[in-house]
Amino acid sequence: MPQGSTRPTAGRPRKPASQKILDGNPGKRPVAVLDFYKDKKVPKKFRKNVPEYLDQASKESDNALPKVTEIYRDIRDFVAAAGCLDYVSDMQMQDYAYLRRSYLECEHFNKVHGRIANGKRSPYVQMALDYQKASLYIFNQIWSAIVQSSTEVSAVDRNSFLKKMETRGF
């Protein structure tokens, strides 16, 4: 059997901060609590220009789908509203935006050209599934950082970013 260091997700999952507070903090250690920003805007110290290379990825179907920079701004504002920009890497948000746009492009091609071509399944079907899986993996990392660090997750529930996720972005 191979031996080595511990796996990153192995073991019992950490209890969210909101659950620790409800249970009365049985460990008696101070609970790290992050509050959501009241105005739901990115604080000045985290406002950066969106990287230019993100829009170079969105060449196809420019008019029908949101640009990568729009998706990036949405996810950045979502994380900022949770007060977790210190805990989520900027590269994670960029990767999520790129993968989400790629998934939407594949779905757009499936809608335009059909899922079956010449009696075979379109290659965009499998590509869409791969992009969706990868973007969901990164979003779960972002979401776990938010859940572990904030006490008011319900305040994010009606965010415009989540509404776009429910409607698939277009």
Image (cartoon, rainbow, N blue to C red):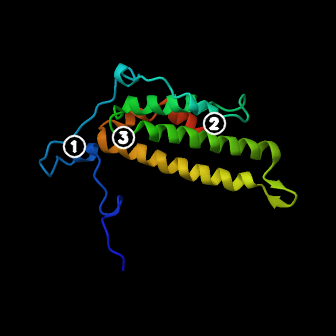
Residue 120, image x and y in percent? 82, 61
- The answer to whether the residues at label 1 and label 2 have Cβ atoms under 8 Å apart is no
Q: Residue flagged by tag 3: what amino acid is it?
A: Ile
Of 135 and 47, nearer the camera is: 47
Residue 86, image x and y in percent? 32, 35
Residue matched to label 1: 21
User: Disc 1 to disc 2, how far (Cα)?
Assistant: 43 Å
Residue 63 position by quadrant: top right
Q: Residue flagged by tag 1: what amino acid is it?
A: Ile
Label drawn at residue 146: 3
Q: Residue at x 70, y 45 (%)?
A: 107
Q: Residue at x 39, y 29 (%)?
A: 81
Residue 11 position by quadrant: bottom left
Q: Helix, strand, or loop for circle 2?
A: loop
User: Disc 3 to disc 2, how far (Cα)?
Assistant: 28 Å
Label drawn at residue 82: none
Which quarter shows the C terminus? Answer: top right
User: Disc 3 to disc 1, how far (Cα)?
Assistant: 16 Å
